[in-house]
Amino acid sequence: MESLSDGKILVVDDVEANIDILVDALEEDYDVSVAMDGESALEAVGEDKPDLILLDVMMPGIDGYEVCKRIKQDPETEHIHIIFVTGVGETLQKSLGYQLGCSDYMTKPFDIVEVKIKVKTLLSLVFFTSEIARLKGQRE
C-alpha cells in the first residue's frame, strides 16, 4: 500500500442495506469490495488479500467468528485487520471476537463517522507498518 487511498477493504454482511451504507461511506476514499456470506468472504480473501475486513457475525453458513478464526490461523492472512460490525453486542460475544483476533468490534446500529475513524486508524497502522518495513529493508 503506497498511500491510505490504496487501502483495500472487504465488507462482509448478508444484509444488502448494511453493505450499501458502508460502501457508500468508504468507496470514495478506499478500494472497497463486498461479500455477502462467510464462504464468499474467505474466497475473496484468498484471491485478493484486503488490508481490512468489516465483518458481520450472524450470517448463513459460515458465521463471522469462523471466518475470523480461519483468517487468523492462516500465516498468509493472519495480518489482516478485522472489525466486527454486528448486531451481536453482548460482552461474551465481544470477548470471543477479540480472542479470535479481531482488531475492533462495533455494534449495529453504528455511527458512520466512527466507522470511518476506525477504518482510517487501522489502515494508517497498515500503511506505516509497511513503510517501516520498506525503509528498514533499504538500510540493510
Image: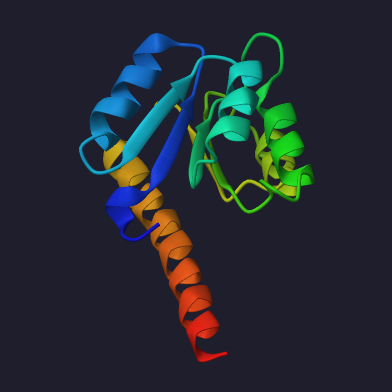
Picture quadrant of residue 23? top left
Q: Is residue 116 visible?
A: yes
Q: Position of residue 31 (x, y in %)?
A: 33, 38
Q: Name the residue rendered at 70%, 39% in the picture.
A: 71
Q: Position of residue 129 (x, y in %)?
A: 50, 69
Q: Position of residue 25 (x, y in %)?
A: 25, 33
Q: Is residue 32 left or right of residue 46?
A: left
Along the line of sight, which residue is nearer the eye, 126 or 107? Answer: 126
Q: Is residue 110 visible?
A: no
The colour style of the image is rainbow
Q: Position of residue 1 (x, y in %)?
A: 40, 57
Q: How many marks?
A: 0
Q: Name the residue rendered at 39%, 62% in the picture.
A: 124
Quarter that holds the C terminus: bottom right
Q: Is residue 46 above or below residue 2?
A: above
Please, which residue is most extreme toward the bottom here? 139
